[in-house]
Amino acid sequence: MPEELTSLDALQSLNLSGNYLSGSIPKKIDTMTALESLDLSRNQLSGHIPSGMSSLTFLSFLNLSCNNLSGQIPTGTQLQTMDASSFIGNKLCGPPLLIKCREDHVTLNRDASTEDGERQDDEYWFRLGIGMGFGVSFGGVIVPLLVCGFWRRAYFWFFEEYLWYKFVDYFMKVKYMF
């Protein structure tokens, strides 16, 4: 895309779709402050979306689909309000797309003081606790029943004789009450 286009600061609409343009989106695109509509779809643009594009306050229509753009969509109120279809056909991540960026994941792991990082830490310890609880209870109940014959007989006697008769006695009392 020609860098000279960015000097057109009063331009309101720009449609360069399907022109097989190559290169990257000019970094000075934020100087086009009156831009309301920008369509750069179906080209061969590569690189990242310039962060200054999020400061184009009048931009109401954007289509960057079917290019070779990559990286995170710049954060700001403007680009996150665009439709996700404006970014398909690229290797982009971040809102408004549902694809999370790996850079976000790495920074969350590095900085455990963030809310998402703390949530991931809590989730890790919660799952570890569940696994440990299962392992200890399995080892404390099932393994002795398999290994020790006396415990196995006592366990089944408890359910067979004691609890069964308690259940039958209770059922008979309820039956005679009505």
Image: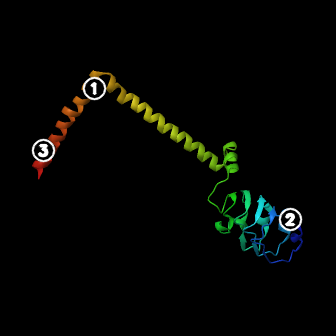
Task: Identify the residue position indicated by label 2 in the image.
Answer: 28
Direction from residue 7 to residue 105 in the image, left or right: left
User: Which residue is more in the foreground, 70 or 119?
Assistant: 70
Closer to us: mark 1 or mark 2?
2
Which percent across, then down, holds residue 110? 69, 42
Residue ID at (77%, 62%): 45
Label 3 neighbour load within 10 Å: few <14, some 14-19, many 20+:
few
Give the quadrant of residue 27.
bottom right
Give the quadrant of residue 152.
top left
Which percent across, then down, holds residue 55? 79, 67
Q: CA distance from mark 3 to mark 2?
A: 87 Å
Closer to us: mark 3 or mark 1?
1
Q: Residue furthest front?
A: 20
All told, the count of numbered labels is 3
Q: Residue furthest left?
A: 176
Q: Which mark is residue 172?
A: 3
Q: Is residue 75 visible?
A: no
Q: Is residue 129 visible?
A: yes
Q: Amino acid at mark 3?
A: Met
- Badge 3 marks a residue whose secondary structure is helix
Q: Which mark is residue 152?
A: 1
Q: Amino acid at mark 1?
A: Arg
User: Which residue is more in the foreground, 132 or 9?
Assistant: 9
